[in-house]
Image (spheres, grey):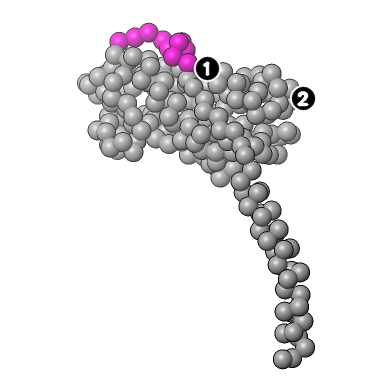
């Protein structure tokens, strides 16, 4: 046997524990514990009273940048810099999370029966599309704020023509700059922005439906 293979055989018992330790370290990193946060929409959030509408609405999953298309909880310590809370997750990626809460907001308004996600296959009259611009905790002068911003568009479901468009924003202060404080602030921001979106959509939908003799 040549000297090189013999040397490898002699060193193998020494190298094997190091290799196993390295694999164990990688597994520990992958299995690091984290907390999953599941925001709820408050049923008593103020939605303008009005008659029940007769048309149906499909709510599309919001379009978002790669940075927002994640279940990681984001924080912006300075403008333009995005970081993550290392041990915290949303239950779904932010766009899907927002879509589910918006559908819930329509259902709890008591003003529309035919509402659901666009993937549900329902026969809708209109679609609600959103471009999600911000969904993060922002630190301004050291003070944390949960910020949600998106552009909403009401579409004719058959032709995909834009019937109305409106920008929405909510900014809720957080008591602390950690994930737990961010979660409470995000629930407050959602309880503000969801009923505003519901009111606008129902109002614009009714106006457009009346114009076309619905």
- Image height of 169 relative to 79, above or below: above
Task: Residue 78: give x, y in percent of width and height.
Answer: 74, 34
Residue at disc 1, secondary structure? helix
- In this rendering, does residue 170 appear at all? no
Task: Residue 17: give x, y in percent of width and height.
Answer: 72, 63
Q: CA distance from mark 1 to mark 2?
A: 23 Å
Quarter of the picture holding the C terminus: top left
Task: Residue 44: give x, y in percent of width and height.
Answer: 45, 10
Q: Which residues are magenta?
A: 42-51
Q: Are marks 1 and 2 in contact (CB under 8 Å)?
A: no
Quarter of the picture holding the N terminus: bottom right
- Image height of 107 relative to 136, above or below: above
Asked if the magenta segment contains residue 44, the reply would be yes
- Image height of 119 relative to 48, above or below: below
Position of 56 compared to 1: left or right? left
Position of 114 compared to 131: left or right? left
Q: Report the number of numbered marks.
A: 2
Give the quadrant of residue 48.
top left
* Residue sitting nearer the eye, 86 or 145: 86
Q: Which mark is residue 47?
A: none
* Residue sitting nearer the eye, 58 or 90: 90
Please name the residue that numbered disc 2 is placed on: 142
Residue at disc 2, secondary structure? loop
Asked if the magenta segment contains residue 134, the reply would be no
> Residue drawn 53% across and 41% down?
69
Position of 13 compared to 154: left or right? right
> Residue drawn 47% across and 20% down?
41
Give the quadrant of residue 160.
top left
Please name the residue that numbered disc 1 is placed on: 192
């Amino acid at each position: 046997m040549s000297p090189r293979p013999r040397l490898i055989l002699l060193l193998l018992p020494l190298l094997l524990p190091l290799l196993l330790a390295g694999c164990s370290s990688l597994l520990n990193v992958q299995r690091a514990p984290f907390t999953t946060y599941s925001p709820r929409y408050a049923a008593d959030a103020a939605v303008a009273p009005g008659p029940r509408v007769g048309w149906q609405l499909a709510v599309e999953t919001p379009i978002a940048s790669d940075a927002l298309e994640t279940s990681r909880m984001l924080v912006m310590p300075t403008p333009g810099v995005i970081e993550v809370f290392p041990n915290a997750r949303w239950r779904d990626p932010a766009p899907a999370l927002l879509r589910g809460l918006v559908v819930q907001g329509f259902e709890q308004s008591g003003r529309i029966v035919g509402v659901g996600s666009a993937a549900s296959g329902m026969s809708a009259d209109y679609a609600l599309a959103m471009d999600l611009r911000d969904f993060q905790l922002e630190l301004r002068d050291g003070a944390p704020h949960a910020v949600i911003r998106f552009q909403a568009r009401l579409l004719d479901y058959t032709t995909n023509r834009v019937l109305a468009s409106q920008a929405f924003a909510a900014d809720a202060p957080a008591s602390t700059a950690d994930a737990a404080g961010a979660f409470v602030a995000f629930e407050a921001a959602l309880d503000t922005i969801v009923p505003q979106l519901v009111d606008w959509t129902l109002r614009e939908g009714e106006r457009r439906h009346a114009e076309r003799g619905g």
